Amino acid sequence: MSDTERAARQSDHKAELGDVAGPVHAGRGHVIQIERMELSASRAADGLKRALAEDDETRHQLLNVLQQLSTLQAQLGEWKELHHILHSVLSALSPFDANLHATGDSAVGLRRGRALLRVWRPCQTEVDRLLDFEQRLAYIRQALCPDQGDDRPKWGANIALLRQEVEDQLRDEAWSTEGLIDLADELNQACHCYLNLVDWELRRAVDHVQRLYTRLIGGLL
């Protein structure tokens, strides 16, 4: 079994971010009046500044924890957006895959290839969106872009290569239905493997945020 198949089978791609229980949070949450919370936050910050005016060490430790929480929340935002984009790629791939399986060998050729290219365009758009998003990453790039010599799969690059192979075949005068089905299957598996990674990273980031909040705020209760 290949790496893509193994990773695809190990994930149901459902990042459970709902119920959180502990000394800090409970239940599914409530509607927050942000203006009221901003006022409370300002008052709390003023109180902490006065209380810690003579305690540089504790003030620096608190600022460090809050900065780490801010970074983790930014990472969560990027993981969630990547998760959404990958689902969009898979949704766009589905109609193309269905059309491809309905195509008989007798229908291959430039005319049928152009028709399938039109069905393929939404998937191409979503893959472009994925690659553009990867280029703009600010907080999770290191996790997705292994250093040279690291043998971890580069799923974004793999997906880009598979997209190019699909398009090259569809523009060929004598493309193979069976070959395109294989490429579509590989693309589907690569996207699922990428989702598997993103799901795991999402859960890990949520866990880290919760642990820090619990340790910080729970200690004040």
Image (cartoon, rainbow, N blue to C red):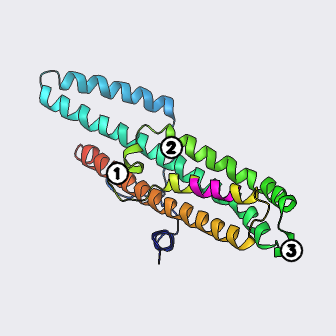
Which residue sits at x=75%, y=59%? 170
Tell me: 144 left or right of 104: left
Label 1: which residue?
Answer: 210
Tell me: 138 left or right of 90: left
Foreground tag (2 vs 1) = 2
Where's residue 3, x and y in %?
45, 70
Tell me: 43 left or right of 9: left
Label 3: which residue?
Answer: 106
Q: If you read the primary sequence from the N terminus, does the residue marked by circle 3 or circle 2 appear first?
A: 3
Give 44 or 103, whichever is nearer the viewer: 103
Is residue 140 in view from this perspective? no
Which residue sits at x=44%, y=28%? 38
Q: If you read the primary sequence from the N terminus, does the residue marked by circle 2 or circle 1 appear first?
A: 2
Is residue 184 in view from this perspective? yes
Q: What element carries label 2?
A: helix
Q: How far apart are marks 1 and 3 (CA)?
A: 58 Å
Q: For the magenta stretch, what is the residue range?
A: 161-167
Tag of residue 89: none
Tell me: 80 left or right of 201: right
Give 198 or 58, whichever is nearer the viewer: 198
Rendered position, 41 above or below 65: above
Q: What element carries label 3?
A: helix
Label 2: which residue?
Answer: 134
Foreground tag (3 vs 2) = 3
Dot 2 amino acid type: Glu
Q: If you read the primary sequence from the N terminus, does the residue marked by circle 1 or circle 3 appear first?
A: 3
Q: Are marks 2 and 1 in contact (CB under 8 Å)?
A: no
